[in-house]
Image (cartoon, rainbow, N blue to C red):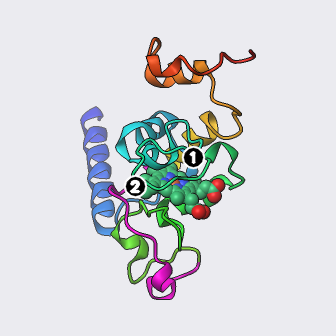
Amino acid sequence: MAAAGHVRSLLALGFSVALSVLFGPVVASAQDADPVLGRQVWQSLANCRECHGWAANGQQELPQQPQGANLRETTLTPADMAEVIRCGRPATEMPYFGGNATWGPNGKCFGMTRAEAGPMMPIKADSSLSDRQISSVVAYIFASLVGKGPITREECDAFFGAGQAKCAGYATAGK
Ligand code: HEC
């Protein structure tokens, strides 16, 4: 009996793999968001920091990149933030991180097709992120950056590891 159950679960697994091959990955919901993955996306899988700064205060890490928005003071909802990351922001230098279909023939961003966006069309980011990576980086941004006020020494130590010279200039929380 155990063997039969095993076969059945293998069949079920095969079936769901076949389904996702046929229909593409099921769109990730916000519940799948993983702040640990989100931190990896923010820290190294995507280049957000180059424009937004490691602590997202809008001070870019790479001087040749455009200055990103201060996400610590964002007023976006998590859903709207996810759309900005997936679609980019038309007519600004915020690039889009969604896959090729994002602005494809059937894709719509902010209610617009690529043709409707025309010259406002955002540029494609250096990397593409899955829906799960996007909902995860949104979860990380809301958990660790939004509304946190000035950058603290503790925050810097937690991000880079204690004892880094670059953290010495930040005030300790509450001082
Ligand atoms: C090439 C530079 C660049 C990169 C890379 C970049 N951004 Fe941006 N981002 C911008 C700019 C510039 C804006 C401001 C757009 C505007 O003027 O409204 C922005 C705006 C945003 C906003 C809207 C904030 C608000 O409150 O309206 C979010 C959210 C955001 N970026 C998240 C991200 C995330 C997450 C990543 C990495 C996955 C990322 N950005 C990568 C340049 C960048």
Which disc is residue 58 wearing? 1
94 horizontally vs 9: left or right:
right
Which disc is residue 74 wearing? none
Residue type at tag 2: Ser
Asked if residue 115 is positioned above or below residue 22 in the image, the reply reads below
At 45% from the left and 17% from the top, the residue drawn is 165
Asked if residue 135 is positioned above or below residue 155 in the image, the reply reads below
At 58% from the left and 74% from the top, the residue drawn is 110
Give percent across and percent down for residue 57.
Answer: 60, 41
Which residue matches tag 2? 130
Q: Closest to the observer: 61 or 31?
A: 61
Give percent across and percent down for residue 87.
Answer: 49, 67
Number of other residues with Cα within 10 Å of mark 2, as a class: few under 14, some 14 to 19, many 20 or more: some
Query: Farthest residue in the bottom direction?
Result: 115
How far apart are labels 2 and 1 at the CA level? 24 Å
- Magenta-colored span: 111-134
At 29% from the left and 35% from the top, the residue drawn is 1
